[in-house]
Amino acid sequence: MNSNMPPQISTFAADVDNLYFLLLWSSLISAVIMIGAMIYFVLKYNRKSPNDKTAYISHNAILEFLWSFIPLVLFMSVFVWGWVVYYKQRNAPEGAMEVHVTGRQWLWEFEYKNGKKMTNELHVPVGVPVKLLMTSADVIHSFYVPSFRQKQDVVPGMYSTTWFEAKEKGIYQVFCTEFCGTNHSAMLAKVHVVDQADFDKWMGADPNAGKSLAERGADLYKVKGCNACHSIDGSKIIGPTFKGAWGREGQYADGSKGTVDENYIRESILNPQAKLVAGYPPNMPSFQGVLNDEEIKSIIEFMKIVK
Ligand code: CUA
């Protein structure tokens, strides 16, 4: 019946689907009964001659009781069922693992209690309740994992929470489901549901071990969302391509000229509107606080090798 739905990965996914299908089927059956009766009456009581008169009918107590009572029972059961599922979705169990989530144009940041920080990648152990403490750095976003049947607005200036417990290992898609600007549709992340042992190993591992600055930069290019606007193959997405950008003479929107060097890249990451390349919209958000000095250095080294 639900073959067209995403897999039911969270503990409450099946509840949400069952309620949804109750609503769908009861609406469908009601519509068929109502429209069917309407068509039947139109044909049966169609005026056959100009002298046809409508019979005088004052009321029918049983009929009126039934058409009030049956919908009442139906609506109340939907309400109670909906409330039970909603309550379960809204209230994380005691002792759930907490992860901080920050939405910003146009990426998701995840920070664990031990300070480990990830962009667009959330790793969680299977079978463990995870509570997300979420806020936004700029505008309203919305955190949505279809396979978890779970969706929550992420609002600047306050925390909102949501939780889930994944029943199966796998990689699941996160969407931003609140229109938040140019790159809203590219504001994607993945939830990696793994064994507790793999999770612990991942938590302790340094993802940069043994990697050159340029290799770290290549990773950051993807996980920090640079790739949403800057290609590395020369194609124009939203911003200028990184291909051959290093050392290029640039013409800026204010008429000035300059060379793409370390200082230009650093400034463009932290204060993107300062020297906007002519012909491009001022869409890039500041990455102040998103990329630290170490990471900016890595991205600079990466840009040097993208030719
Ligand atoms: Cu963030 Cu849409």
Image (cartoon, helix red, strand yellow):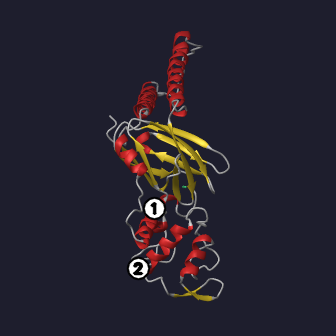
CA distance separating discs 1 and 2: 18 Å
Marks 1 and 2: CB-CB under 8 Å? no
Position of 239 with respect to 169 (left or right) is right
Picture quadrant where residue 12 is located:
top left
In the image, residue 48 sits, relative to residue 265, either above or below, namely above
The answer to whether residue 179 of the structure is visible from this angle is no
- At 51% from the left and 28% from the top, the residue drawn is 82
Q: Nearer the viewer, residue 51 or 298?
A: 298
Position of 127 with respect to 159 (left or right) is left
- At 34% from the left and 39% from the top, the residue drawn is 168
Q: Which mark is residue 145?
A: none
Residue bearing mark 1: 223
Image coordinates of residue 170 in percent, x first then y, are 34, 46
Residue bearing mark 2: 305
Image coordinates of residue 9 in percent, x first then y, are 38, 38
- At 51% from the left and 25% from the top, the residue drawn is 84
Q: Amino acid at mark 2?
A: Ile
Quadrant showing the C terminus: bottom left
Position of 2 with respect to 117 (left or right) is left
